[in-house]
Amino acid sequence: MIPTFDAALLRDRALALLRRNLHQGYDPYFRRHYAYVCPARRRYHWQWFWDSCFHAIAFSRLDLALAKQELLNLVSVQESDGFIGHVTHWGRRPILSIWGYFQSRLSLRPHHTALIQPPVLAYATWRVFQADEDKAFLREMLPRLNSYYRWLAEHRDPDGDGLISIITPYESGLDHSPAYDAILNVRSQRPSRVITELRLRLLDARHLLLSPNYNLEHILAWDRFVLEDVLVNCSYAEGLWALSELNRAAAQPAQAAAWEDMAQGVEAGILDKCYDPATGLYFNLEGRAERQHPVLTVTALFPLILRSLPRARANGIVRHLTDPNEFWLAYPVPSVARSEPSFDPSRERFLWRGPTWLNTNWFLVRGLRLHGYGQLADTIAHRSAEMVLREGFREYYNPLTGQGMGVRGFGWSTLVVDML
Ligand code: GLC
């Protein structure tokens, strides 16, 4: 049975939280004013790339002016070649963590990291634009979006197959996911958090010191962690479709057609190369050899958001999603299937190893609706709303009990307002 809940209350709370997490001021390094919503006031006070896109999407349902402000602030630090870092260090606050330095090019105070995050930006812009078709907003965003996605295609596709590569798990947005264990030589099914995290940080340090200074050509040629990640590429495909729509809205049909071709190519690449016929799921491709590691994480379900996913393939994914031994737990969708030995539903601060996160639910809910599984999508949306109303906007939730975990007042969990 679908539980009843108060959607208006949820919206009020979502808006109050996003406003509470708003940081604004003058940045003496960039020499400009800034205003953005941080993921969570205590632990994550900088501007994170995909978090901001999610905040803007939630805002598009709650406060359109703040939605536009969020995205304009994010693109305001774009470099001349199109790149936008995954964390922007706004304000006067010193960067106290050594890890922030490891993820950035050498500088006394790096303004942003040298890493990317899943490219949700064009889709987020498309959603905000659709809300009121503000042409001035489109004019400001579009050249920056075109150049950002051009940067990705030119700098992150070393084998030229259309799929983009990430160079550290942090770029996937799913930091400690067991999908990356084998590549990082994490052999235990229940590894220590400290040691796993250390391996990730050493990879960052290696990129900074030996590659050196985040030289991408060097990093990609070294081929230690170069991964065509399914989640990242599904989000990329969705971004390219959105970019094509935005260019069409701006009366740039040739550019629109070019992005559409690319979107189709990326979708075809995922469906062809990441598909594992044995399971009917999709796995990341490691390195030049494009080796798959068949670990059942939420990433394996992501092709649900692709437009060209054939019906039979969608059914195959849904079979796993609705299997109570895998992803269909009391509070779906867990970041790791219950059948995986690494499934760890209640561990805090060791991220993406079992708990349910609302941003991945939001992607899957949309994918399910796209392919005609409306009821299933509604069930996930309602369970998500139930968790939020009972536990608050938490960073992640225990998939067996719905208990809130991780930081409180976590921005992107407000995406629930866009699922209903
Ligand atoms: C964690 C998440 C990442 C997110 C960041 C800020 O590192 O894994 O996806 O962007 O926190 O919320």
Image (cartoon, rainbow, N blue to C red):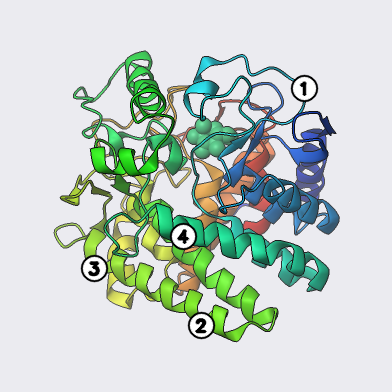
Badge 2 vs badge 4, beta-carbon distance below 8 Å:
no
87 sits left or right of 302 in the view: right
From the image, tell me which residue sits under label 1: 92
Q: State whether residue 308 is above or below residue 238.
A: below
| Among the two numbered marks 2 and 1 on one chain, the one whose residue lies closer to the N terminus | 1
Q: Between marks 1 and 3, how big is the CA–CA gap?
A: 47 Å
Q: Tell me the mark number nearer the camera, choosing from 2 and 4.
A: 2
Secondary element type, mark 2: helix
Q: Residues within 10 Å of mark 1 (few under 14, many from 20)?
A: few
Q: Between marks 3 and 4, how big is the CA–CA gap?
A: 16 Å
| Among the two numbered marks 3 and 4 on one chain, the one whose residue lies closer to the N terminus | 4
| Residue 299 in view (yes/no) | yes
From the image, tell me which residue sits under label 2: 257
Q: Amino acid at mark 3?
A: Asp
Residue ID at (51%, 30%)? 105
| Residue 322 in view (yes/no) | no
11 sits left or right of 219 in the view: right
Q: Quadrant of residue 46?
A: top right
Q: Between marks 2 and 1, how big is the CA–CA gap?
A: 43 Å
From the image, tell me which residue sits under label 4: 236
Q: Residues within 10 Å of mark 3 (few under 14, many from 20)?
A: few
Q: Between marks 2 and 4, how big is the CA–CA gap?
A: 16 Å
| Among the two numbered marks 1 and 3 on one chain, the one whose residue lies closer to the N terminus | 1
Q: Indicate the position of residue 176 as horizontal and vertical percent values.
A: 38, 30
Pick the quarter of the image with the N terminus: bottom right
| Among the two numbered marks 4 and 1 on one chain, the one whose residue lies closer to the N terminus | 1
**How many labels were placed on the picture?**
4
Q: State whether residue 391 is above or below residue 136.
A: above
415 sits left or right of 33 in the view: left
From the image, tell me which residue sits under label 3: 272
